[in-house]
Amino acid sequence: MRWLLVFCWFCSAGQAAQPIALAIHGGAGTIDRSVLGEAQEAAIRADLEAALDAGYTLLNEGGAALDAVTAVVTLLEDSPHFNAGKGAVFNADGKNELDAAIMDGVGQRAGAVAALTQIKNPILLARAVMERSVHVMMIGAGAQAFAREVGIAFVEPSYFRTEGRWQQYLKAKAAALSPRAALPVSNYFGTVGAVALDRQGHLAAATSTGGMTLKKYGRVGDAPIIGAGTWADDQCAVSATGWGEFFIRLNVAHDICARVRYGGVTLSKAADTVVLERVPALGGDGGVIALDSKGRVHMPFNTSGMYRAAIDGRGKRVVAIYREPAPKAPNK
């Protein structure tokens, strides 16, 4: 009986030593309570909660980190409240162009797609590129031809249009044409993403975006660039959101994980150094969700807000939008 108790203790210890964790984001930028409104904020929080619960349930039932991030990002792409999939912003020509990437920490397998116009869930095509082709990235018409071969769902371009995004586009276009007004770039970007740790100790990351409002001439941001907006290895996973040009130049996602791997620094220190020091030093802004192999989550950003949610390795849950907690109502 004693040996059985000892054996069971080791089993329990082994299970406790391998936590699961999940973090998600719905974009960073200038997010103002007065502009967002109570109803829209409630809808956004509900979608974040639903995506978090779906991904965490999958992990808790023994599912793979790769499946969890795929499920989460697919749900966020289907929501009209985020700049990805259904809620994508409009480019300079008044069209939607979608990018996505996914990375498996096991062997650093990766898949990415860019400049899509008819793919309902770009993250599913990115995963197909990773698993069903010899390539890492496909773009535009070629990517969509591959999508037809592997059975990825298509939609008409009108599917992506939402009235809120259209009005945002018209406002941004008018501002850009006015000699007295400048387009505040940080108001017009966003992305969705997820990072996950499963019971096998494997990490994965996924990111999807509609890019920046008024983007021109085939512009592609950091989200589908492996190492810039998306990265996962066996110690660290990162999904980024922000002004993509700066995240590409600084290779933000990989830089954070490289600091953990080679510099021996903590995840929080690595992410803070890159997001709060290096990115703004060049004039960029944005944020990341980062997760390590111990289940530690860190979600720094240098904007006024970032849609985010997480359940870390200790089971601590957070769903937030703004930098600071909402002020408490005065006692009556």
Image (spheres, rainbow, N blue to C red):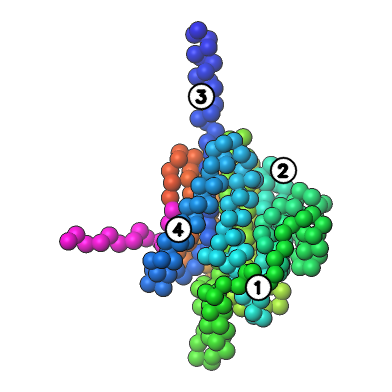
Dot 2 falls on a residue whose secondary structure is loop
Question: Horizontally, is 131 left or right of 314 in the view?
Answer: right
- Please, what is the three-letter code of the amino acid marked with disc 1? Ser
Q: Earlier in the sequence, mark 1 or mark 4?
A: 4
Q: Position of residue 212 (x, y in %)?
A: 60, 72
Label 2 near label 3: C-beta < 8 Å? Answer: no
Q: Does the segment drawn in magenta span residue 201? A: no
Q: Nearer the viewer, mark 3 or mark 1?
A: 1
| Mark 4 element type | helix
What's the CA distance linking mark 1 and mark 4? 26 Å
Q: Secondary structure beneath disc 3?
A: helix
Q: Which residue is mark 1?
A: 158
Q: Which residue is mark 4?
A: 45
**First in sequence: mark 2 vs mark 1:** 2
Pick whichever of labels 3 and 2 is earlier in the sequence.
3
State the residue position of label 3.
Answer: 12
Residue kind at label 3, given as amino acid type: Ser
Q: Is there a contact, CB below 8 Å, between mark 3 and mark 1? A: no
> Is residue 324 on the magenta stretch?
yes
Residue 267: x and y in percent read 52, 47
Residue 140: horizontal and vertical position, in percent?
76, 68
Q: CA distance from mark 4 to mark 2?
A: 34 Å
In the image: residue 324, left or right of residue 101: left
* Among the two numbered marks 4 and 2 on one chain, the one whose residue lies closer to the N terminus: 4
Mark 4 Cα shell of 10 Å, populated few (<14), some (14-19), many (≥20): some
Residue pointed to by mark 2: 107
Residue 185 occupies quadrant: bottom right
- The Cα atoms of the two marked residues, 3 and 1, are separated by 52 Å
Count of numbered labels shown in the rendering: 4
